[in-house]
Image: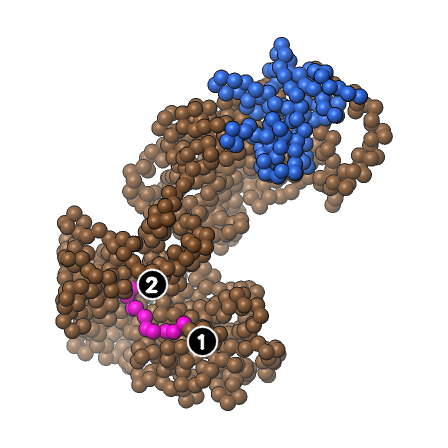
Chain colours: A blue, B brown
Amino acid sequence: MSTQDKWITVCSDTDLVTNSGVCALLNEQQIALFKIKSANSEQVFAVSNWDPIGKANVLYRGLLGSVEKVNVIISPLYKQRYCLVSGLCLDDEAIKLVVYPVRIEQNQVQLQLVD
Amino acid sequence: MSNLINVHSGNNMRIVVVGNGMVGHHFVDQLIQENIADTNTQLDIVVLSAEPRLAYDRVHLSEYFSGKTADELALTTPEYYHEHNVKFALNAKVVNIDKLAKSVTTEAGEVFAYDKLVLSTGSFPFVPPIPGNDQPHCLVYRTIEDLENISASSAVSKVGVVVGGGLLGLEAANALKEAGLQTHVVEFAPQLMAVQVDNGGGRVLRSKIESLGVQVHTQKATQSIEAGETCRYKMCFADGEVLETDMILFSAGIRPQDALAREFDIAIGERGGIVVNDQCLTSEPDIYAIGECALWNNFIFGLVAPGYTMARAAASHIIGGDVAFQGADMSTKLKLMGVEVGSIGDAHARTDGALCYTYENQPLEVYKKIVVDSQQKKLLGAVLIGDTSDYDTLLQYALNDIELPEHPESLILPAGEGAAPGLGADALPDTATICSCHNVSKGDIIQAFDTGSCNLADIKACTKASSGCGGCTALLKTVVDSELTKRGVEVKKDICEHFAYSRQEMFHLVKVGGIKTFDELLEKHGKGLGCEICKPVSASILASVWNDFILKPDHVSLQDTNDTYLGNMQKDGTYSVIPRIAGGEITPEKLIVLGQVAKDYKLYTKITGGQRIDLFGARVEQLPAIWQTLIEAGFETGHAYAKALRTVKSCVGSTWCRYGVQDSVGQAIDLENRYKGLRAPHKIKFAVSGCTRECAEAQSKDIGVIATENGWNLYVCGNGGMKPRHGDLFATDLDTETLVKYIDRVLMFYVRTGDRLQRTSVWMENLEGGLAYLQQVVIEDSLGLGEELEAQMQNVVDTYQCEWKTAIESEQSRKRFRQFVNSDKSDLNIVFVEEREQIRPATESEKQQFSQAQVSEEKDTELATELV
C-alpha cells in the first residue's frame, strides 16, 4: 500500500514543545517530532524515534543542537548526533534515521508516511 | 625451614632486598616498573623487612600525631606487592649473609638465595651515651612504633624534652607540642639546625620557635639523667644547670644501620656506613647498598631524594642501564612548626672567596642570606628563615650555574624595593631538575608535552612531578604555562563550538549580565543552536545563579534527558526513581510505601551506595503517578538525575554506637537538607562519620565530615569512582556553624569556578596553590568573597523546591511525561523478563522470541492506530 503524497494529521501544533521533542505513533511507527524556533524562523522536523545504536525508542527525548550549520538531534543514550534533514548519523556514516515529510497546516501537524 | 620461596623459577634473576623503608620500596618500585616495561625478562623480587609493616612515609611521620593513620602513611600495600609478584616477609630480620653460596638467613632461620643482594637497612637514631638514657620514658623518633610509644608516654607526662635541635629534633618538638606537652629543645651546638643554617639564621629561627612556646637551650651537654623532684626525671648539664622533665626524646642525629655488612666483611667507612661506588655497589660484587646505610664519597645522605637517586642507580646497574649516583644536592625547604626554613648549597659560605648578601627584617622575623662566588656571578648557597618564597628561584640559580643578575641582592629584597622578578622558566636549561623527589627535569616535562600531555594535570600524572613533597608545585606550573605559551597553545577553554568561553566565564556572563535564559545567553554571547555540552552547562549555571524551576518552558529544552524527565534513563529507555532519604534515615512507614510503589508498578528495587533505594523500570508515562504517591507519603526528589548534591551518607553515630562521639545522622540530615537541589559542575557527595573509625567513608567524598571529641573535622575534594582520591583534611574541630560556613564557601566557590563535569578533586588539583589556596580563600577569606559566597548559597537554600512536586502540580509539565503525543499506548519495545524474582530488561534475542509469539495474537488491535 503506497501512502505517498497523503498528509496525515497526528497532533495539534500546541502539542509540540519549542526547541524540544515529542513522539507520535502512526501505523505502529514511532515518529519523533521537533520544533526549532529561532528569532526569525520556526521549523518542524520528523524522524524515526528508534535509536539504532542505543536500541530503544528514545530519540524524542534527546537534545536539539547544531553542528556548524546543521541542525541535529542528539541521542539521550549515547550522544550520537543525527542530522534532522537527512537523518544521517554524524558519528557513524553507516547509520541513518528515517526522515518523514512534515508540515503544519492550520495549526495541525501533518506527516507523510514513507515505505 | 628453607621453603619454596627459595627455589629459583626458571632463569629469572633473583633480587633480595633487605629493608623496606622509603628507599628500599622505591628500589622495588623501579624493578616492578622494569618488569612491566619488559615482559620478556622478569626479575624475581624478595623483600625482607625487620619492621612489622611495609614501607611508609617517614618524611611525614609527625602527621601521625595530627591524625594520620599508619594506613595513610603507607607507601605501598601487600596487595600491590602481590599483584606484581613481589614476595615479602615482615618481622624478618636478616642475620647472616653467605657470600659464597649467595644466600641470606633471617632470624627465624629462613634461607633466601639471591643473584643480587640489595642492602637498604637505613639508619637508627643516635642516642648519646648519657648515664640514665635507658629509662622507660627515654625514647627515640624514627618508626611508627616509636610514635606509638611517644603517644603513650605523652599521655602520662606534662613536660617533654627533645635532645637535638636539628631538623628532625624540631619536628619531634612539634609533635610533643601538639601532644600538649610543655616542650623544651636541648642542643649541644650554639644554635639550632647548625648543619643547614648559619648563625644569623639560627638566631632568627630560635626566636621564632621560642615565640611558639617551645623553650630552646643551646650549648648544653647532658651529663646524666636522674630521678626528678617535680617531674619524673632531671637532666643534669655540664654547666651545672638542671632541667626537670617527664620524658626525653633523643633526636641527636642518625647512624647508618651497617651492622650486617660490618659482620660479614663488607667494606665500612671510618665513621660507619657501607662504602658504595657510583652504581651503589659495595666492596662485594652482587651486593649493593642504598639510602641512609650507604656511604658515598665518605658522605651519608640523610634525605629521601638522594636515597631515591641511589635506588634508581642500583636498579639501573642491575638491569644493565647506566644511571649513576653522583652525589646529591642537600638543599631543603620545609615548614617547622609553621616556620618556613630553606637552606641551599654552601649555606655557611665555606667556599674560598665566597661573599654574602644578607637581608633581615626583625619586626617580621624574616632572615635571608645568599652566598655568591668571588666574581659575584654564581650563587653558591642561601639561607631563608621566615619566608621561603624565593627558594625555587634561588635553587635553580645554584643548581644550574645560571649567571646572577647585576645586583644579586635584588634576589632576596622584598618586592617593591628593586627586587628582580622571579627567574622565568625560559631561563632554565632542559637539564634543570624541577621535581627532585621524582627526578623530573624540565626536559622531561617538554618530552611529556611532545608525547601528548596537554595540561598541568596530564604532566603530573605522566611524570609524577610534584607528587612527592609538593615543594615544586609553583615552579612546575610556571614551567608548564611557559611551555604552553611557547607552543603557541592558547590554552583553549571554550566549552564547545557555540560558546568561546570556559564554564567559569559563562558563569560570570550570566551572573554579571543578569541573564536568565539560554536564548538570551546564546543571542548575546554564542552562536548556532547549542549542543549537548553547552545546553546542560547553561542550565546548570542558570540553576546555580537563579535557582528557577528547571522545567520552566525557558529551560526545558536545555536539559539532558535525565534532567528533563527527572529520572535516570536506563538502557531500554525506562527510568529509575530515587527519592531522597536524607542521611540514609527512613521510617518503617516510608519503607513500606517504597515497597508498595515497587509492587504496584512492578519495579526492580536495589539499595544504592548512597544509602537510598533505587526503583528501576518505570516507563516515562508512569513517572508522574509514581511520584504523586511518593510525594503524598512525604518523599521528595533525590536529584539522582542531576549534577547536584546527591547524598550525605552517615554512620549511626553517638545516638546508638558505643564509639560515636557526635550525632552523625543528625548532622548528615541537616547538611543534606541544606544543600539538596544545589546545581554544580558535577555531582557532589557528602558523608558524615560519628567518630574516627570513619564507617561512613567520608574521606572518599567531595565533602567529608568526621566527628571529634571537640566538634567536626572537615575533609574536602575526595571521590570514589574511576580515579579514587582521598579528601584532604581542610580544618579541624569545627563547631557546626563554622562547618556550615566553610562548606558553603567551598561549594559555592566550586560552583562558580569549576569546569564542566569537573569533580571537586580535579578542580582543586587544578587550582593554582591547591589545598593551601582553597584554605586561604575559605578560611582566611583572602579574596574577600566569603560573605558573597555564603549569601549566594543562602539564596539557593531559600529558593529550594522539590522539582517533582512542582512538575506534577503543573498540567503543562505533566504533559511531557508521555510516550506518545497522540496515543495512551506504551512503547512495545520495552519488555521485561524475570530474574531472581524481579524484573530486568529483556535482551534483544529474548525480545525477538517475545514479539514472534505476540504478533499473531495482537496484530489486529495494534493496527488500529489512534489519530487525533
> Disc 1 on helix, strand or loop?
helix
Image quadrant where residue B39 sits: bottom right
* B373 magenta-colored: no
Give the tally of numbered discs.
Answer: 2
- Residue B206 at least partly seen: no
Residue shown at the point (54%, 26%) measured from the top left: B557
Mark closest to the chain's N terminus, 1 or 2: 1
Between A26 and B217, the one lying in front of the other is A26
- Per the picture, the main secondary structure of the magenta-coloured stretch is loop
Is label 1 or label 2 in front? 2
Residue B303 to residue B607: above or below: below
User: Contact (CB < 8 A) between labels 1 and 2?
Assistant: no
Q: Is residue B556 left or right of residue A88?
A: left
Query: Mark 1 falls within which chain?
Result: B
Q: Is residue B310 left or right of residue B780?
A: right
Q: Is residue A44 left or right of residue B186?
A: right
Residue shown at the point (53%, 75%) measured from the top left: B46
Q: Which residues are magenta?
A: B323-332
Q: Which residue is mark 1?
A: B317
Q: Residue flagged by tag 2: what amino acid is it?
A: Thr
